[in-house]
Image (spheres, grey):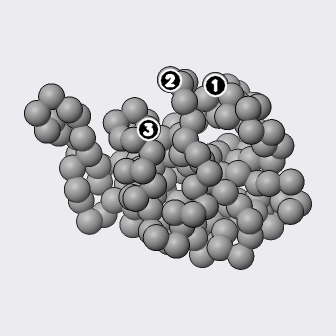
Amino acid sequence: MKAILFVDFDGVFHAMDSRDLEYSGSVLVVSDNPDLFQWAPLLWQIIEPYPVELVVHSSWRHLYPADELIARFPAAMQPRIAGITEGRERHQSILNYACMNDVKRFAVLDDSPEAFPGNWPNLIVCNSQRGINDADVLEKIRTFVETSEY
């Protein structure tokens, strides 16, 4: 059974205030900042030995095509990105992806618990300024990965 981690970007892989939006012509883009994705290697250290796949559910999916989103990740992680959710509401886009791809075991990394219904399964909430750079969050990810059946 494959295990999936649905990942947000802002407030998960970097502090929420690391991201600056600006217009390039009439297109809204995220300006480059060396702090972006600074904590992605922490996730890689945990998932690397396991066949865990990542699916992007970040709002960045509305700004960039898939190849540009994937290119933001460290090179070693890029082959693990299985897809990108579609739709507006985070929880619904995750459910749709899980249904369409026969995903039975998943967890969600997000800093916006209010975007999910009350008893959302395996929601790992990050502090928007610490993201996954938090011992409690890393332990929850480790527990999810290590208790998944592969």
- Outermost residue on the left side: it is 25
Residue drawn at x 73%, y 32% is 100
Q: Residues within 10 Å of mark 1 (few under 14, many from 20)?
A: some
Q: Secondary structure at mark 2?
A: loop
Disc 2 to disc 1: CB gap under 8 Å? yes
Q: Secondary structure at mark 1?
A: helix
Q: Nearer the viewer, residue 125 or 80?
A: 80
Residue denoted by label 2: 88
Q: Please identify the quarter of the rendering in which residue 97 is found.
A: top right
Residue drawn at x 57%, y 36% is 85
Residue drawn at x 22%, y 56% is 32
- Position of residue 33 in the picture relative to residue 66 (left or right): left
- Position of residue 38 in the picture relative to residue 146 (left or right): left
Q: Residues within 10 Å of mark 2 (few under 14, many from 20)?
A: few
The answer to whether 43 is drawn above or below residue 104 in the figure is below
Work out whether mark 3 precedes mark 1 in sequence or the reverse, and give the earlier one.
3
Residue denoted by label 3: 61
Provide residue 149's location: percent of width, then percent of height: 88, 60
Q: Quadrant of the N terminus?
A: bottom right
Label 2 – label 3 distance at C-alpha: 10 Å
Q: Secondary structure at mark 3?
A: helix
Q: Please identify the quarter of the rendering in which residue 89 is found.
A: top right
Residue 118, numbered circle: none
The answer to whether 73 is drawn above or below residue 54 in the figure is below
Q: Is residue 5 visible?
A: yes
Residue drawn at x 52%, y 72% is 76
Provide residue 137's location: percent of width, then percent of height: 61, 59
Residue denoted by label 1: 92
